[in-house]
Amino acid sequence: MDEVPPLVARLEAASRRAETPCGRGGMVWHLWGEGPPLVLLHGGAGSWRHWARNIEALSRNRLVLAADLPGLGESDLPPLPPTPQGVTAVLSAGLDALLGPGTRFDLMGFSFGAVLSGGLAALRDRDLRSLTLVGAGGLGLPRPPVVLEKIRDKRGEERAAAHRTNLARLMLADPARIDATALAIQSWNSDHTRINSRSFMSPTWLRDALPGVTAPLNVIFGERDAIAWPQLEARFDLIRGIRPDARCRAIPGAGHWVAYEAAEAFNQAVEGMLPPAA
């Protein structure tokens, strides 16, 4: 699993890499395409690679900016001790550096990135064209317990098997869809995780932030998302209680990492939800 999958290699070669200040170091971004900016924030213990099966479709008519969030991927740690406000400030300053203050953009976050997106959206509401939440936590609702295999003490085939188990338990609903690329992304992300995102996030951070967001709101879950199923409708109801105009969509048969597992359906759903690129 040390080899870079062809899809990831192709995307990385086509990207423009940028760094913005983050703690004592830098936060890494990868950029593709031209047009209205679309900012992508990945999930916990992840990197921009969480969007590997979406970037080419989304960047056809847009400037896609995919972050490695602080302490994850290639980015350095945020100011310590980490706080949601501190990480949000790093993100906001980074966007100003890359886009220029006042530039309008669409924002999409997955899982931990969706929770952070709520705070960033409330901070930058006047600059937002839209906010899209994917597999979002931070709503203060119960979530089924998911027990993951420990990775750090494993090597070789045992380590690969543990990654496969964790993907099946948390990320993908259908184990048959766990391919070599998903395993390689999971392995790389795990090896580059230096911060536990759940250790400093309030369980209601997103719910508390949403009343401050007036931009058009889209919500996407995989129908069999391990953190929401079988109470997915409760999440939609809570969000609609705050934002009655929110557009909510469940992708049939998909799990938590819906953007990867059901990429074609996900990409089509996003294109139908985002403001026109032209």
Image (spheres, grey):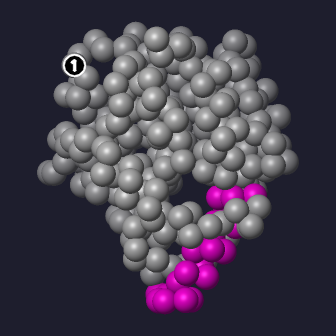
- Return the x and y of residue 42 as percentages of the image width and height: 47, 46
- Badge 1 marks a residue whose secondary structure is loop
Residue at image position (47%, 89%) is: 155
Q: Can residue 31 be seen in this view?
A: yes
Vertical relation: 190 (above or below) 25: below
Q: Can residue 88 be seen in this view?
A: no
Total count of labels: 1
- Return the x and y of residue 189 as percentages of the image width and height: 43, 63
The residue pinned by badge 1 equals 100
Tell me the quarter of the picture where residue 85 sits.
top left
Mark 1 residue crowding within 10 angstroms, few (<14) / some (14–19) / many (20+): few
Magenta stretch: give its range.
Answer: 153-173
Residue 272 horizontal side relative to residue 186, left or right = right
The verdict on residue 162 being magenta is: yes
Residue situated furthest left in the rendering: 24
Q: Main secondary structure of the magenta part?
A: helix
Residue at image position (28%, 28%) is: 95
Vertical relation: 215 (above or below) 66: above
- Return the x and y of residue 234 as percentages of the image width and height: 80, 35
